[in-house]
Amino acid sequence: MSISVEPGPQRERAPGTPVELDRARHPQYGRYLDELEPGQVFEHPRGFTFTTTNMLDFARIFMQANPLYLNRQFARELGFPDLPASPQMVFNVVLSLGVQNDSEKAIANLGYYDVEFLRPVYHGDTLRAFTRVLDRKDRGADKPGIATIRTVGVNQDDDVVLQYERKIMVGWRGERLPTTPAPAFSGKFPDADASRLALPLAATPPPSALGGPNTWFEDFCAGDIVVHANGRTITDEHMALTYLVGNSHPLHFDREYSRAQSGKMSGEPIVYGGLVFAWLEGLASRDISERSVWELGFTEGYHTQPAFAGDTVGALTRILAAEDAPGTAGYGIVTSQLIGVKNLTARAALDRFGEDLFIKENSKRDLGKDKIPEKIFEIERRLLIPRRPMGL
């Protein structure tokens, strides 16, 4: 079926059309604190179709060393039907899809909680996202408050691929312009049961020389601290990369907006935290996740300081647990704490700050300790990693 349109000749109309200043509109996106009501649900606009090109580009830009996200043949040998997207890309895209409705007015993203990756995403999959407002804590109309939200990403078959919660700091609207209303949501919010995770993996992982020599399950013991050798200097590239994953918050790419802010947020555009997380995870991947077959999820993650163009970021990992994976003898689960620092090497950070690097920044006041300005990120993550095959 098609339509036939006859628009007629193109004519210049602007000179003869009067300017009516009283009809100027100022669309606003995101939500102020008083516009986020517990129970409110947003179905986010647009969606995002994954292609092999954008999946490989993301994995390379963010220094991913795991061949699972770079090598189709390797992915198929593991049991995947095709090259899967990096979970970091899935996380960045789903979070970014929601920004227009839930956090484009946010002052800061405070934390990630209970992040669960439930299905692989492949070439041709199209993800959409939904967010429910769980809670709102007010501190008075003259102070920013905190909203807790839950976001779920689904594919074209309405299967949940990712779900998580996060907290955002956002101010009251007051006398400012109201935001553009979002369409009312009348469907069923797509929660999922994390226990339904099923991966297309062989019961016994095939031996391969493509992964790192020290990244089998047996190579990790609780208490180990891995200091990742390389850093990564961020440039103005971050502004284009922010919109490449669909994040529409102007704090990350609009210099005029950024300079109009107050406090730490005033000045140059801040690097979108999801990109910082992705670079830190990439810096760690050769040492930690190069043989991982699945990112189970992460929690208690915080951006403790902002990053800007010109900053060099580095990463350290502390192993918290290495445990059997229920239901399989061929794999184990490694839980770790990923720490990000800026403008000094990871080795220098460990030498200077020692165990204080691994204490949550929000806990330090109660412990009588100073926060670390060079520490920019902390999170716990769980990886499904193959056991070393016999003879290797």
Image (cartoon, rainbow, N blue to C red):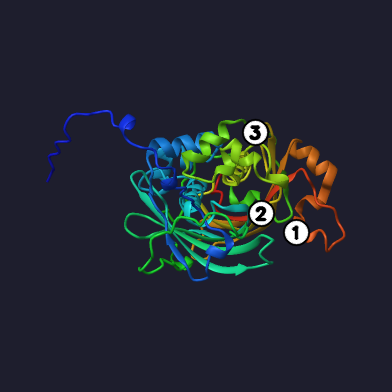
Left/right placement of residue 108 relative to residue 44 reads right
Q: Nearer the viewer, mark 3 or mark 2?
A: 3
Of mark 1 and mark 3, the one earlier in the sequence is: 3
Q: In the displayed structure, would residue 132 be above or below residue 77?
A: below
Residue in the foreground of this view, choosing between 206 and 1: 1
On the image, numbered disc 1 is attached to which residue? 362
Question: What residue is at 38 percent from the left and 65 percent from the top?
Answer: 185
| Amino acid bearing label 3 | Ala
The C terminus appears in which quarter of the rendering? top right
Task: Answer yes or no: is residue 71 visible.
Answer: no
On the image, numbered disc 2 is attached to which residue? 302
Left/right placement of residue 161 relative to residue 32 reads left
On the image, numbered disc 3 is attached to which residue? 309
How far apart in space, not on screen, are marks 3 and 2 (Cα)?
20 Å
Q: In the displayed structure, would residue 96 be above or below residue 299?
A: above
How far apart in space, not on screen, are marks 1 and 2 (Cα)?
9 Å
Residue that extends furthest to the bottom in the rendered view of this protein: 39
Task: Answer yes or no: is residue 108 visible.
Answer: yes
